[in-house]
Image (cartoon, rainbow, N blue to C red):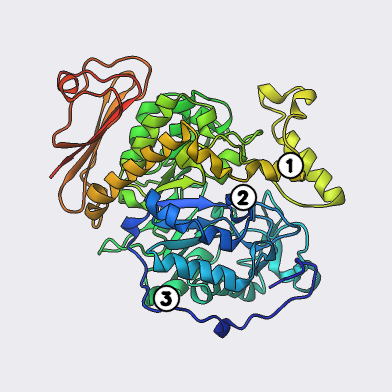
């Protein structure tokens, strides 16, 4: 623990000093997962673990079952996304003491909530990383990352490096009682040895805390490497239970906003087909060439994996903050489009993830922010603006000046949630909408997800913007979603069998039975 930030003296924390009261907690099944990603420093005006704890009842009422904290490992200064951490075992003192974090987890467990932590094992931040001075074998020049020196997971002296990160994962799960970890950008973890560090880490977790309670490991992997998501003969994950599915975000976003620049170009043609593939097979790119990547093939076959192997979302920290101005999807799409894609997200079998404030259609940005000093701060500011220079709207240097300075305290303050919005229309109506959908999910869908398999999915397209997708759930019931994701009425859509669970405003059963589906509409059915 670094009470005076990362350049100050360290304080040793006795793990026996906290009186845990959650010894009977055994976790929750993966099928229960509804994630809520938050940044501790921006979730409330206080920006502390204690302040997050005060909002757990709100999250329960919303329908969340898993709180996911963005990285908390010690970073330089008082504000940071968390991906510039340099002391992976030390919770940042800006958020509170280690016991405050433990109390947050303990209180969440008492309320039936899981807590996940985002961890960064692909690089160390640029400020305060003293490992280069006394442990050079941690790093290698044989590989590169976009953020700093690559970690040595397979070269000489790599055994100690591998153990360091394995022990870090165990540390958070054992000493802080987290229910799972989200491993950041593992495509930037290079390891040519066997077993791969990701596999060895997962095995250590399974043999340790995972042998005592339900622990869930989740990946972010831009390579769409399905091999890390394999199931055994009993249908249980051999290593990682799921991956964040960026493909689904991109196709949702393209449909709702019609944006087609950058990586959205890979999803702009035949978006309905791509959406169906993601809903029925997981990854949209399963080895096909990516135009955005210059024809490079991306992904592995995923159609054999159950739908619960993919965490879907409309927003997360990356997809908002990686935009030049940090806008959320609600600022880029119509309310009708946002309503439709939200319904599909929350009523599909895949575990959904909400980003803080999404449930009330928060219109505040979430820009990238940090607290570097001097030359490093200047480089980050300029690098951020050059990153977007290729986009048409930012080719002019004058327009790039609109891009927020990551190091400015005002940039950070703009991201802090304003909870006052909850009492203002239409934000209060959006909150009710999300609560209703998650209520339907928990009552009718979640209890049927255990044992769900890849087999039993099907789909139909109603050109140009209509679709119907169905899944056979673990109890044999059939869940169907029919949607029109366009501005024109569809005249020949087919009504699924079963009882209606949900319909967006404007959908009438009598009209749907005759093939009529209004613009930007969704209906969900369950056949038992």
Judge whether 444 appears above or below 276 on screen. Answer: below
State which tag comes first along the sequence, 1 or 2: 2
Residue under label 3, please give it.
22
Position of residue 441 measured from the top left corner of the image (x, y, whole percent): 29, 46
Q: Which residue is mark 2?
A: 42
**Residue 237 locus on image (x, y percent):** 35, 62
**How far is disc 3 from disc 1 in space, using C-alphas?**
39 Å
287 or 89, nearer to the observer? 89
Q: Which element type, helix, strand or loop, lies under badge 1? A: helix
Element assignment for label 3:
loop
Task: Decide which of 6, 460 is in the foreground and name it.
Answer: 6
- Quarter of the image that includes the C terminus: top left
Residue occupying image coordinates x 75% and y 66%: 5
Residue lying farthest to the front in this orientation: 423
Q: Quadrant of residue 277?
A: top left
Residue in front for this viewpoint, 360 or 77? 360
Name the residue carrying label 1: 410
Left or right of residue 84, residue 44 in this image: left
Residue displayed at 39% across by 31% down = 339
Q: List x then y, in percent, for residue 485.
A: 36, 24
Q: Residue at 70% x, 62% y: name it.
A: 140
Q: Residues within 10 Å of mark 1 (few under 14, many from 20)?
A: few
Q: Is residue 33 above or below residue 520?
A: below
- Measuring from the top left, give residue 230's x and y in whole percent: 36, 58
């Amino acid at each position: 623990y670094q009470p005076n930030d990362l350049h100050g003296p360290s304080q040793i924390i006795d793990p026996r000093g906290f009186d845990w009261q959650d010894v009977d907690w055994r976790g929750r099944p993966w099928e229960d997962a509804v994630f809520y990603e938050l940044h501790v420093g921006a979730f409330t005006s206080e920006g502390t673990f204690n302040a997050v704890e005060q909002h757990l009842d709100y999250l329960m009422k919303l329908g969340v079952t898993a709180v996911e904290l963005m990285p908390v490992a010690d970073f330089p200064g008082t504000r940071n996304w968390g991906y510039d951490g340099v002391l992976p075992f030390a919770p940042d003192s800006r958020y509170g003491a280690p016991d405050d974090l433990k109390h947050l987890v303990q209180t969440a467990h008492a309320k039936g909530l899981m807590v996940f932590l985002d961890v960064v094992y692909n690089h160390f931040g640029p400020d305060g990383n003293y490992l280069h001075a006394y442990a050079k074998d941690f790093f290698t020049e044989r590989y590169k990352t976009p953020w700093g020196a690559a970690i040595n997971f397979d070269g000489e002296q790599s055994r100690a490096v591998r153990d360091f990160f394995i022990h870090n994962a165990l540390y958070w799960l054992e000493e802080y009682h987290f229910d799972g970890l989200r491993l950041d950008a593992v495509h930037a973890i290079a390891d040519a040895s066997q077993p791969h560090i990701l596999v060895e880490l997962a095995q250590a977790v399974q043999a340790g805390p995972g042998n005592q309670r339900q622990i869930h490991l989740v990946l972010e992997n831009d390579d769409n490497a399905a091999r890390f998501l394999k199931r055994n003969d009993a249908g249980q994950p051999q290593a990682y239970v799921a991956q964040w599915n960026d493909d689904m975000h991109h196709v949702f976003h393209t449909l709702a906003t019609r944006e087609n620049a950058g990586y959205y170009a890979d999803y702009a043609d035949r978006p309905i087909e791509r959406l169906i593939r993601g809903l029925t097979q997981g990854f949209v790119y399963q080895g096909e060439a990516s135009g955005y990547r210059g024809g490079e093939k991306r992904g592995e076959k995923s159609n054999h994996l159950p739908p619960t192997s993919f965490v879907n979302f409309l927003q997360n920290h990356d997809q908002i903050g990686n935009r030049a101005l940090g806008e959320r999807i609600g600022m880029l799409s119509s309310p009708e489009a946002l309503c439709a894609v939200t319904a599909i997200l929350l009523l599909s079998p895949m575990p959904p993830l909400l980003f803080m404030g999404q449930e009330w259609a928060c219109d505040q940005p979430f820009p990238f922010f940090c607290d570097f000093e001097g030359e490093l701060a200047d480089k980050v500011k300029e690098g951020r603006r050059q990153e977007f220079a290729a986009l048409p709207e930012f080719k002019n240097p004058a327009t790039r000046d609109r891009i927020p300075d990551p190091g400015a305290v005002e940039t950070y303050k703009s991201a802090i949630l304003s909870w006052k919005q909850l009492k203002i229309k239409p934000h209060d109506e959006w909150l009710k909408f999300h609560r209703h959908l998650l209520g339907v999910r928990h009552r009718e869908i979640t209890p049927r997800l255990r044992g769900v398999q890849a087999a039993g999915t099907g789909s139909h397209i109603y050109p140009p913007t209509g679709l119907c997708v169905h899944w056979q759930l673990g109890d044999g019931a059939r869940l169907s979603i029919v949607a029109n994701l366009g501005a024109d009425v569809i005249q020949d859509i087919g009504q699924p069998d079963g009882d209606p669970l949900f319909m967006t405003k404007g959908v009438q059963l009598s009209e749907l039975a005759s093939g009529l589906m209004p613009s930007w509409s969704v209906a969900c059915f369950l056949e038992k």
